[in-house]
Image: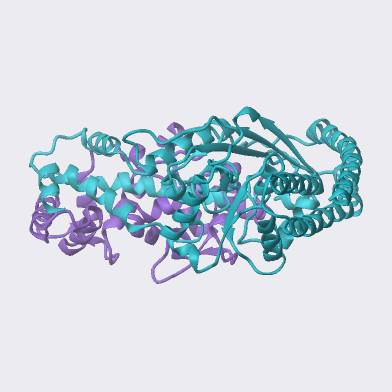
């Protein structure tokens, strides 16, 4: 029957989100009811605490980085539009979209945008390059206390060495893309949204 | 003594008369519910189907390893580095999946219905569908609030009042068979009146497995009504915290007629004291079986969450009971963060009916080499299977508290093992 709050989402908003993200009408209403159930404060926006309340996300080693990706620079609240915009990156790429020549710009779930999402997981200060320190910090999040600093450092050094082509000891987005060019990003960075 | 028995007989007669009347009403409601409502409404396009799937909250090491190998398979890495930038994809995807839908947070809100049951509280979408429906709904409101609710309230007050008065009177009797016999009769009668007060239509299955003296009865917990439902079919010793007010009054008078286990607020934290009192009780075969809800909190009746192992350490026979409510006639789940007890009771008494099934499962005992937690999980699996509920390993305490850090550390350990091999990690932890 739909969600408690679907009456608060207007048709015009749904149409706009549809155009921007490519989700279907029913997917948008379903995600809106999910958004509403996470919004404990009922103020139309999610805070970091609201995300932390999901146990499976709280135990994910990269949970904090993923939550951060929803919030634009310097903000503490994300509204439904922002929520959908971020989730849109994970929409599967349909076959008929792969060859479409889009004049309205690249869709949010294109390969490049998916890679950019992953790039931002590593790029902590959002300066468009991954430094050794940033890589170390993210690695530390993923392995916890189980690997020594020296070993982690050498892993980070090796990774940067392989990826870095212009010698600045940082990984830029194009270098990142080059390293992962053979990976099936479209499939690995997509989830199934129920209709 | 004779006077008391005839008083009880009179009430039995009244009780039976009310029974017959309510059976007629129930039949009418059920007919309306099953045929009328369903045919009027369009079924929703998205239904939620809960199936019995055992869900493991830890990423299994094999699936993590397979995923990472799969991501990297398309290109052979020239160097010996085990780490790859694409490793983050796996965690990222799992994280986003849990944001879109997770199995825990939805256990703490009422289940969504596939089609509306003419109760405003289950109407999530306030759109106007048809005026025919609105008229029906209005009629429903009149019936429920004008007719059913006053009747039910009267019954409830009668039931509770009788319980307090009669158990206090029985308390004056000397301990012995007569006292136990009378206490049993009084308890059963009063609980049955309360069941009528809620118009609860209960189907008991496998009554041959009913709990016996010296055992512990465990059941899944959805609302405080569970107690009334189980206690109207058999006598149990209750376990709980002493409250103040009306609840406390009821508790104190119940314990005069037969031994229940009530704890002071301060004693609840002391696990050893709790365990001792419970085991003392079960050792005495003349005492009634204990009724415990090991989840510790109300869950929305679509899943069964982690059982606390305290009651499974005691070592007596465990009688599992599965309770499943039919949400179409009235949602029984008590969402204590949304509304308090009085509001909840009002909702219960103004729904159509509370329909539920109770299955008495065969008794289980802890086997050799099984620790309390494994035993608890085995009982939980049996209850989930019987009731058609999802068996979860998550703790019901997550309703109010944060998840423990140890789970995150487990995941980090798993990933570290893949990165550098088991040997290195073991030597460090």
Q: Quadrant of residue B163?
A: bottom right
Residue B93 in sight:
yes
Residue at the outermost bottom position = A74
Q: Does residue B229 appear left or right of residue B370 in this picture? A: right
Residue nearest the observer in this picture, B191 or A43: B191
Residue B242: where, in percent of width, then height?
60, 64
Residue B272: where, in percent of width, then height?
41, 58
Q: Does residue B17 appear left or right of residue B243 in this picture? A: right
Residue A1 in sight:
no
Residue nearest the observer in this picture, B249 or A123: B249
The answer to whether residue B245 is above or below residue A9 is below
Q: Does residue A127 appear left or right of residue B322 in this picture? A: left
Measuring 47% from the left and 35% from the top, which residue is drawn there?
Answer: B381
The answer to whether residue A172 is above or below residue B9 is below
The answer to whether residue B235 is above or below residue A132 is above
Residue B424: where, in percent of width, then height?
10, 47
Measuring 52% from the left and 50% from the top, which residue is drawn there?
Answer: B281
User: Which chain is painted in purple?
Assistant: A
Measuring 62% from the left and 53% from the top, which residue is drawn there?
Answer: B259
Give the mark count. Answer: 0
Residue B102: where, in percent of width, then height?
48, 47
Residue nearest the observer in this picture, A184 or B233: B233
Q: Quadrant of residue A49?
A: bottom left
Measuring 69% from the left and 61% from the top, which residue is drawn there?
Answer: B341
Q: Colour of chain B?
A: cyan
The answer to whether residue B195 is above or below residue B397 is above
Q: How is the image coloured?
A: by chain
């Amino acid at each position: 029957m739909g969600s408690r709050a679907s009456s608060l989402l207007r048709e015009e908003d749904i149409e706009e989100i549809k155009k921007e993200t490519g989700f279907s009408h029913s997917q948008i209403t379903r995600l809106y009811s999910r958004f509403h159930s996470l919004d404990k404060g009922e103020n139309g926006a999610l805070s970091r605490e609201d995300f932390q309340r999901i146990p499976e996300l709280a135990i994910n080693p990269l949970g904090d980085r993923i939550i951060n990706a929803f919030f634009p620079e310097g903000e503490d609240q994300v509204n439904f539009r922002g929520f959908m915009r971020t989730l849109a990156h994970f929409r599967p790429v349909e076959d008929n979209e792969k060859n479409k020549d889009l004049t309205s710009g690249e869709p949010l779930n294109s390969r490049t945008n998916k890679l950019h999402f992953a790039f931002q997981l590593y790029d902590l200060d959002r300066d468009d390059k991954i430094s050794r320190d940033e890589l170390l910090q993210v690695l530390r999040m993923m392995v916890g206390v189980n690997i020594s600093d020296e070993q982690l450092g050498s892993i980070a050094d090796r990774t940067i060495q392989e990826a870095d082509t212009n010698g600045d000891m940082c990984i830029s987005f194009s270098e990142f893309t080059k390293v992962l060019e053979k990976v099936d990003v479209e499939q690995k960075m997509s989830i199934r949204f129920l209709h | 003594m004779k006077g008391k028995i005839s008083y009880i007989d009179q009430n039995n007669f009244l009780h039976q008369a009310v029974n017959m009347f309510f059976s007629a009403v129930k039949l009418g409601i059920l007919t309306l519910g099953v045929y009328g409502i369903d045919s009027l409404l369009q079924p929703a396009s998205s239904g939620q189907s809960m199936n019995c799937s055992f869900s493991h909250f830890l990423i299994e090491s094999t699936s993590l390893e397979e995923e990472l190998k799969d991501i990297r398979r398309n290109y052979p890495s020239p160097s010996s580095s085990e780490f790859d930038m694409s490793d983050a994809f796996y965690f990222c995807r799992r994280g986003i999946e849990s944001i879109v839908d997770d199995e825990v947070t939805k256990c703490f809100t009422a289940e969504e219905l596939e089609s509306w049951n003419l109760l405003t509280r289950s109407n999530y979408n306030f759109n106007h569908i048809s005026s025919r429906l609105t008229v029906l709904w209005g009629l429903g409101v009149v019936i429920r609030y004008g007719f059913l609710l006053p009747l039910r309230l009267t019954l409830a007050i009668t039931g509770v009042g009788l319980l307090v008065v009669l158990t206090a009177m029985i308390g004056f009797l000397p301990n012995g068979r007569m006292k136990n016999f009378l206490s049993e009769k009084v308890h059963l009668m009063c609980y049955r009146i309360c069941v009528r007060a809620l118009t609860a239509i209960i189907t008991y299955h496998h009554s041959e497995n009913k709990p016996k003296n010296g055992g512990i009865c465990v059941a899944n917990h959805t609302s405080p009504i569970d107690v009334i439902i189980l206690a109207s079919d058999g006598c149990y010793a209750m376990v709980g915290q002493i409250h103040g007010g009306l609840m406390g009054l009821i508790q104190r008078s119940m314990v005069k007629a037969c031994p229940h286990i009530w704890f002071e607020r301060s004693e609840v934290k002391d696990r050893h004291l709790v365990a001792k009192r419970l085991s003392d009780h079960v050792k005495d075969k003349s005492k009634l079986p204990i009724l415990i809800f090991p989840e510790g909190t109300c869950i929305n009746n679509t899943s069964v969450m982690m059982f606390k192992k305290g009651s499974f350490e005691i070592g007596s026979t465990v009688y599992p009971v599965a309770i499943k409510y039919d949400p179409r006639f009235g949602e029984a789940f008590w969402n204590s963060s949304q509304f308090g007890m009085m509001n909840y009771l009002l909702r219960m008494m103004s729904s159509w009916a509370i329909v539920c099934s109770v299955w008495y499962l065969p008794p289980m005992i802890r086997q050799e080499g099984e620790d309390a937690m494994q035993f608890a999980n085995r009982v939980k699996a049996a209850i989930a299977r019987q009731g058609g509920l999802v068996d979860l390993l998550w703790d019901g305490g997550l309703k109010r508290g944060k998840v423990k850090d140890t789970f995150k550390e487990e995941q980090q350990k798993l990933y570290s093992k893949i990165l550098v091999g088991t040997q290195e990690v073991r030597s460090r932890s």
